[in-house]
Amino acid sequence: MILTYGSWWLLWIFIQAWVLNNLALPWKEAFVDATISNIVLTLCAYATEITSRYYNPNKQRAWFRFVWGIGLAYVCAFSTELILAQIFADQPSFLLYLVKSGPLRFIYSFLMISFMAVISYLLRQMKEEEENKNRKNDAQNLLREAELANLRQQIQPHFLFNSLNSISALVGTRPEEARKMIYQLSDFLRGTLKKDEQQLVPLSEELEHLKLYLEIEKVRFGHRLQSDIQCDEKSMHMKLPALLLQPIVENAIKFGLYDTIGDVVIKIDARSTNNSLNITIENPYDSETSKPKHGTGFGLNSVQRRLYLLYARNDLLNTTTTKNTFNTAVKIPQSL
Amino acid sequence: MIKAVIIDDEPLARGIIKEYLAHHPEIQLMHECSDGFEGVKAIMQHQPDLIFLDIQMPKINGFEMLELLDPVPAVIFTTAFDEYAIKAFEAHAIDYLLKPFGKERFDKAVQKWTQQKSQNGTDNNTAALIEKMPRQPDEQHRVVVKNGSNIRIIPVQDIFYIEAYDDYVKIFTKDNYQLKKKTMSHFEEVLDPKEFLRVHRSFIVQLQQITKVEQSDKSTHVALLKNGAKVPLSRTGYSKLKEVLGV
């Protein structure tokens, strides 16, 4: 940085000296003049840089910069002449030249200072932009990480440990089934980990994942848990955010199994309309003992939030209850 | 001969305990139950020395089931990950088995229980545990009571007020009440303070059931409830109520 700066000024010293020499000034005087004026200019430019670093007038006060530039140019030209007059005090012709070149020096200084100011302004702007970009990137990474952490939490430790306990029980008596459950559990976990929360997947893929989950839960709870999945042909190809239904089904199972005593049938129904995919998930429930207090409640808030973030709509998730069933309906808009 | 009962809603989870118990001929398995209702029935019928109890179960959880029992039998809890519960278990030196658990761990738990029993006689720490146990979130929404052999679940919204009654409390719903062996401070702690307020040493009332507060004589007030019941307010109770209702 200092090197470029130095050679920049050196270049100007030579140019100025050459111009002065062409204007009939001897080489020695030309060089001294050029060196002195450019050193003074360097100091002034540095002063501008320093002030603009700490004091940045806004656009309305641009005239301030202008006045500052003129003042500085004046100081610059004046002090250069003062110094040169001291050095060449014994050469009357040079002193005369100094007086005559005054206005030119002033204009030259002003142009140089303005030029330096513009350059430093542009450099600062570039740096700021880069910082902004970095900050944006950081924010996005943080968001992604948070989402991933969220994703990992979706694997309920209860579910995992209870499944492992079932496998442990099966190993002794029915090793083939134990092995099958290990595969299912592995596939399920892998499916949960690899998916990007932003990604859209076809319903068929989401259902495969849900089936794995249901199969594992069925091993745990035996014949008490059953599932019934119905979808029309067209809906299978429609897309929805990956793993969106997982927490809803989890909730339905938990709710069904722990809120009632009898058999639990989880019904999943998917229908396509012109521009949306409509999915309802139904579980039995006991209206006598559990009264949903808030609109959606029951652990569905995260689903609601996600839908809002993705579609900027709050009306895509709805729950209804009858005397014996609890229904969760999700509507996924399909982009055309 | 040691009598045991298993209570767990997952058949395979019961299976593995049965399998491990087969190596302990001194323990006889009297019954296996898939929920707390069956559990209460089986325990009253068989009077087991030891029960293996899961916590998360349909309708009423393991702790709620224990609350319905008097006396409370010795318990070895079997549960999946639950760090809050684990702290409480450890504090009361009651053993617990974290699913999945191996045979060695199971044997150790049984051995520990046998030792404790020979040292303390029939005493066990379960009663103290239930009293101190941090409550599960679902317990904020319901109260489980037993009336003879009938078990009832009362959603907290249906409670009008609770009255202290010696070692028990009377839980008043619209037109009758249920007895439960619990303290007032227990309910004060468990119930949502935004909805329930202790308005008297012996009374907790659900705020939304109050229709009117009136003066009964010079210095005392009563709250009139939607079902016509009257609940006395202590002086501090009255000012607390005024503050909560914002009048």
Image (cartoon, coloured by chain):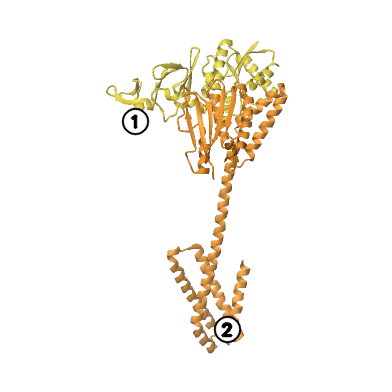
Q: Please name the color used to draw chain A.
A: orange
- Residue A260 visible within the image: yes
Q: Please name the color used to draw chain B.
A: yellow
SS at mark 1? helix
Give me the disc on residue A20: 2
Residue A44 position (above or below residue A309): below
Q: Nearer the viewer, residue B173 or A82?
A: B173
The spot of residue A13 in percent (x, y) is 59, 77
Q: In which quarter of the image is residue B170?
A: top left
Residue reaching furthest left? B218
User: Where does the C terminus of chain A fall, quadrant-wise?
Assistant: top right
Q: Which of A298 and B172 is in front in this view?
A: A298
Disc 2 from disc 1: Cα separation: 94 Å
Q: In which quarter of the image is residue B128?
A: top right
Q: Are marks 2 and 1 in contact (CB under 8 Å)?
A: no
Looking at the picture, which amino acid does disc 2 mark?
Leu
The spot of residue B104 in percent (x, y) is 70, 23
Q: How many labels does the image show?
A: 2
Question: Do marks 2 and 1 both belong to one polypeptide chain?
Answer: no
Category of crowding for the residue at label 2, using alpha-carbon neighbours closer than 10 angstroms: few (below 14), some (14–19), many (at least 20): some
SS at mark 2? helix
The spot of residue A125 in percent (x, y) is 53, 62
The spot of residue A78 in percent (x, y) is 49, 78
Looking at the picture, which amino acid does disc 1 mark?
Lys
Category of crowding for the residue at label 1, using alpha-carbon neighbours closer than 10 angstroms: few (below 14), some (14–19), many (at least 20): few
Give me the disc on residue B242: 1
